[in-house]
Amino acid sequence: MLEISVATYNIHKGFSQFNRRFVLYELRQRLRELDADIVFLQEVLGANSHSALQGVADLARSQHEFLAHEKWPYHAYGKNSVYDSGHHGNAILSRFPILNWGNLDISAHRFENRGVLHCELTLPQGGSLHCLCVHLGLFKRGRNQQFGALVDLIRQVIPHDAPLIIAGDFNDWNNHARRSLANELDLHEVFESGGGSLARSFPVSFPVLRLDRIYLRGLSVKNSAVHAQYPWNKISDHAALSANLSLP
């Protein structure tokens, strides 16, 4: 049995809640303390010419490369939103080799660019693990389209008997994911497993909304945690989620 630790985090482009401070160094330290094998990140800056980043040599690289440095040797970045000063998207950091990866554009309209980053990882005992990092839209109609695109992607590309993890910021106010992912694709959510409830993750100062999720297929949950207390509440506007999993 292989044990795998995972974490998901909307890093708010490296800024604290309300954009008060640039906190990427603190963020890297907190992620290293979690010591997850696979990290799913949303709102990651791939390039930015903003004045807050000027003159900092360590940040000449994209944020996912800075965060992965010497800790996660394998990583992938999916560019979703492009603007004059740069671009941002989703990223996956991994201790396991990435066999292949791709980024699917699931934008519902031109005012809100969204994507699904898909990585196939090679596991130590052989075989592969499929990982999808998602950040869905703010509006219900667009999210419904994105859930449909996500279901189609999984059915068309990922074998039903292959272990699968989907993690990220779902912005899913009405828990449509339970119907789309659990019922149609036989996935279960980490915090709901065993009769629990979805994790409250936003806003980090007083988490009431259950926006961030970790869905599984072919893996079981050993334990899980929400990271919303100090010092996590001084970093992003979301809480981080983590879980220890096992693969038969």
Image (cartoon, rainbow, N blue to C red):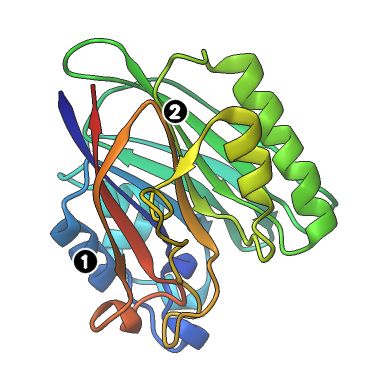
State the mark number for residue 141: none
On residue 119, which mark appears? 2
| Mark found first going from the N terminus, 2 or 1 | 1
Q: Is residue 21 above or below residue 246?
A: below
Q: Which residue is mark 1?
A: 30
Q: Is residue 203 left or right of residue 3?
A: right
Whole-Å distance between the Cαs marked 2 and 1?
24 Å
Please say whether residue 93 is visible from this viewpoint. Answer: yes
The three-letter amino acid code for the residue at tag 1 is: Arg
Dot 2 lies on which element?
A: strand
> Whole-percent x and y of residue 77?
47, 40
Q: Are marks 2 and 1 in contact (CB under 8 Å)?
A: no
* Position in image of residue 225 (x %, y %): 27, 62
Q: Tell me if 56 is positioned left or right of 2 in this view.
A: right
Q: On the rendered structure, is 67 left or right of 134? A: left
Give the residue drawn at x 72%, y 52%: 113
